[in-house]
């Protein structure tokens, strides 16, 4: 998404603005299903200029992004979920973020 894109995902949650236009993309992931598949899921982890993390997710009606609507269940897009740094780090570890990206965005990662 380009900077200043008025259609880019953003939301105010708990008095904080989470805006893709001003945040840095840490890592994005999709489960490999085609967009037309009910199980398709895409998530992108961002970090705000103040160091807060949030996930922007979308998916089909058989994913965690399913929404009930009149007449059934549908998928949704651009659902913003704030994450703690610990939750964001766990998400990165589970979704294949590179070591350099993790070390760049997270404090406290130590040698084993």
Image (cartoon, rainbow, N blue to C red):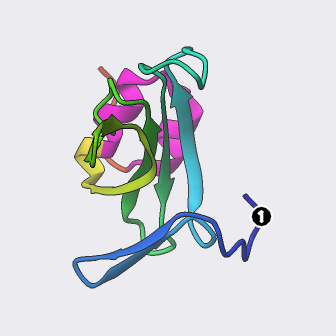
- Name which residue lies at 40% across and 38% down: 75
Vertical order, 49 against 35 (above or below): below
Label 1 CA crowd tier, 10 Å (few <14, some 14–19, many 20+):
few
The foreground one among 62 and 55 is 62
Judged left or right of residue 102, residue 15 is left
Vertical side of 8 occupied by 95: above or below:
above
The answer, for residue 109, to whether it is visible in the render is no
Is residue 43 visible from the viewing direction of this image?
yes
Residue 6 placed where, x, y %?
67, 75
**Horizontally, is 104 left or right of 21 in the view?**
left
Q: Is residue 37 or residue 33 the one in the foreground?
A: 37
Disc 1: which residue: 2
Q: x, y (%) of residue 48? A: 48, 68
- What residue is rendered at 56% in x and 14% in y? 32
Q: Quadrant of the N terminus?
A: bottom right
The magenta stretch spans which residues?
88-106
- Residue 17, given in percent of the width and then of the height, sits at 41, 79
Q: Is residue 10 rendered magenta in the image?
A: no
Mark 1: secondary structure: loop
Q: Could you tell me which residue is drawn at 46 percent across and 41 percent down? A: 58
Q: Position of residue 98 (x, y in %)?
A: 56, 27
Does residue 89 show up magenta in the picture?
yes
Can you say whether 30 is above or below 59 in the image? above
Q: Nearer the viewer, residue 6 or 82?
A: 6
Dominant secondary structure (helix, strand or loop) of the stretch shown in magenta: helix
């Amino acid at each position: 998404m380009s900077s200043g894109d008025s259609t880019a995902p953003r939301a105010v949650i708990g008095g904080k603005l989470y805006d893709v236009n001003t945040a840095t993309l840490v890592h994005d992931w999709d489960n490999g299903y085609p967009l037309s598949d009910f199980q398709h899921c895409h998530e992108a982890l961002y970090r705000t200029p103040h160091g807060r993390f949030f996930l922007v997710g979308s998916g089909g009606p058989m994913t965690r992004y399913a929404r009930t609507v009149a007449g059934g269940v549908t998928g949704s897009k651009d659902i913003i979920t704030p994450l703690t740094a610990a939750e964001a780090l766990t998400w990165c570890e589970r979704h294949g973020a590179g070591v350099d990206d993790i070390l760049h965005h997270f404090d406290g990662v130590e040698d084993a």
